[in-house]
Image (cartoon, rainbow, N blue to C red):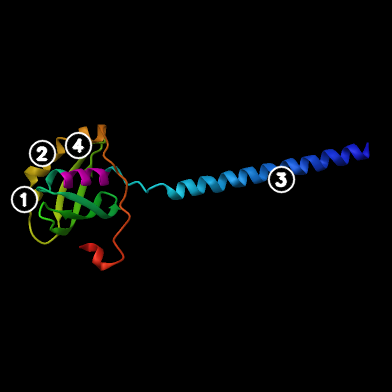
Amino acid sequence: MAEAKKTSSTLKKKTSKKRGWVWGGGFILVLIILGLMPRQGSLNFGLCKAFIELNETYPQSVEYVAAEDMAEVQRVSYIRVDPFGQRTFNTIVCRFKTFDDGRLILERVNINGDRAYPQEDPANVARFNRGISALIANPPDVTLPEGLPANIKDYR
């Protein structure tokens, strides 16, 4: 009887040890998977990105390098490559407004902060706002950029 009790308690200890290892291994696996997933931005980032893509004139490519989300303000830095290979670094600030009924509009846009660009025109922003409902229904890619290059030569 005492021997049977010993075996059952030893068996319970081994089973609980195995369970602990399985749960610990599963937890570590989940942490690794979450660490490898790309970071996701907000809907405001997706809308600001869509505004850039719709309003850049003849870009060969647009590479997003940084994004900052500050409640109703979204700042996105990107490198635009034109058809001649000229690379320009730009920063756009999109200011959004949310109404009580849940509607979201782009209130104002500021590109590079220094001078007025034609894309900043309120009529252009109003035209973009008409399509926001379609963008919300078919959300754009909101994967955040990895950040600014560490080497200054990578900006070229």
Whether the magenta-drawn stretch holds residue 51 is answered as yes
Find residue 40 and report its horizontal and vertical position in percent: 35, 46
The secondary element bearing badge 4 is classed as helix
Q: Which residue lies furthest to the front in this view?
A: 84
* Image position of 39 (left or right of 73): right
Residue type at mark 1 is Pro
Residue 75 versus residue 46 in the image, above or below: below
The secondary element bearing badge 1 is classed as helix
Q: Which of marks 1 and 2 is nearer the N terminus?
A: 1
**Quarter of the rendering containing residue 10:** top right
Other residues around mark 1 within 10 Å, as few (<14) / some (14–19) / many (≥20): few
Residue 131 in view here:
yes
Q: Looking at the rendered structure, which numbered label has been put on residue 132?
A: 4
Q: Looking at the rendered structure, which numbered label has been put on residue 127?
A: 2
Q: What stretch is highlighted in magenta?
A: 44-53
> Which is more toward the observer, 72 or 18?
18
Residue at horizontal 22 percent and vertical 43 percent from the top: 47
Other residues around mark 3 within 10 Å, as few (<14) / some (14–19) / many (≥20): few
Residue type at mark 4 is Ile
Residue ID for mark 1: 118
* Real-space Cα separation, disc 2 to disc 4, in angstroms: 10 Å
Residue ID for mark 3: 17
* Real-space Cα separation, disc 2 to disc 3, in angstroms: 63 Å
Find residue 20 and report its horizontal and vertical position in percent: 67, 45
* Real-space Cα separation, disc 3 to disc 4, in angstroms: 54 Å
Q: Earlier in the sequence, mark 3 or mark 4?
A: 3
Q: Earlier in the sequence, mark 4 or mark 1?
A: 1
Residue type at mark 2 is Arg
Residue depth check, mark 3 versus mark 4: number of the one nearer the observer: 3
Residue depth check, mark 2 versus mark 3: number of the one nearer the observer: 3
